[in-house]
Amino acid sequence: DEIEEYQNNLSELEKQQNAYENSIRVKRQEINNLNNQLGILDDSISKIDLEIQSAKLNIEKTNLEIENIKLEIERKEREIRGQKDKMSDVIKSIDKHERKKSYLEILIVKGELGEFFKAANEFQVLEESLNEQLSSLNDLRNQLNDRKVNLESRKKQLVKLQEKLSEKNDLLSSDKLVKAQLLSRTQGQEANFQKLLDEVKAEQNQINADIQSLEIEARKKLLESQGKLPVGEDFIWPVPSRKVTAYFHDPDYPYRYIFEHPAVDIGSTPHGTPIRAAKSGYVAKVKFSPGSTSYGYILLVHEGGLSTVYGHISKPYVNEDSYVVQGEVIALSGGTPGTSGAGNLTTGAHLHFEVRLNGIPVDPLKYLP
């Protein structure tokens, strides 16, 4: 049938995806050069393209399953109506017998035991029939409820599949942009690629060094704020979107060959979205040069050894050596290639959000609600 055909096609696509996944894994173990990175990106683009095809097929398959379940529900509802009609006929027959004289009266008036037993037997048969009809009706109702539960489950699954399709489309666009950037920045030359690697690594190392060196002094400042800032707060999301496009230490992060991704990237965050402090704290660092594409970020230091970093900002709203409360707008988001604060390598407009514990990056999703 159609659903089985969809399943067979999905299985075939999964085999092809696994082949590209294995190819990417092998390439990641090889020497880090331009051709290898372009090969990884090409394999990744092909794999994501197959995943998009799979997501579309899954959506079509789920829609078909939903339609089939709806037809089953209609059929069960018809069966229930038919069963109710049968029960109505039985109840009418019982009612007719109820209106007759009692069995004792039949026995007294007619003096015939045969008539008595015949009437009693008819009544018993009707009662048994009614019980059977009731049992059958209950079974049908249970089956109908099961179908309705299944329908709701499939509808929820459909929403998740559509979200997954949207994520895969974003990921495909991101990888294509990364490849275009890589070719543009290197002009296809290995020497330029190695130079770019050195620049990005140096930038990342400098950021880490700055953050760690600032932590000690910032902690002293935070102690001075005792009584001024709330304590014991839980984290809040820094932007309205909850859509994570790259996870902490994400194996699919396109620049993993340079460094592990120490954050979550929050997508569906248009350039210029207000960024709010995820927790009250001290502004330890604001790195931003107006008109420069160099990486812009804000470092906030919080109680309990925690700190947060907000990367790819396009405009800061706070100054260093100041205090902010949770929910206060601290900057506008950025990340669009070639814009202020976007940084050397960016995959498009989003917020790069880090949580650090004693200066060491940890998974932000363990802290966000």
Image (cartoon, rainbow, N blue to C red):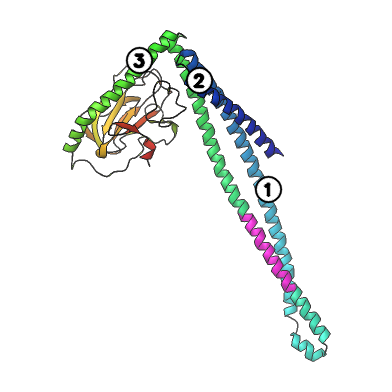
Q: CA distance from mark 3 to mark 2?
A: 23 Å
Quarter-wise, where is residue 224 in the image?
top left
- Res. 71 mark: 1
N-term mark: 3 or 2:
2
Q: Main secondary structure of the magenta part?
A: helix
Instruction: Report the residue marked by disc 3.
Output: 199
> Of circles 3 and 2, which is in front?
2
Instruction: Report the residue marked by disc 2.
Output: 27
Mark 3 and 2 residues: CB-CB less than 8 Å, in contact?
A: no
- Amino acid bearing label 2: Lys
Query: Could you tell me residue 115's position as x and y percent?
Result: 82, 84
Tell me which segment is drawn in magenta: 126-145
As displayed, is residue 70 above or below residue 103?
above
Query: Could you tell me residue 112's position as x and y percent?
Result: 83, 88
* Observer-nearest of 15 and 274: 15
Q: CA distance from mark 2 to mark 1?
A: 49 Å
Mark 1 element type: helix
Image quarter of the C terminus = top left
* Observer-nearest of 81 and 177: 177
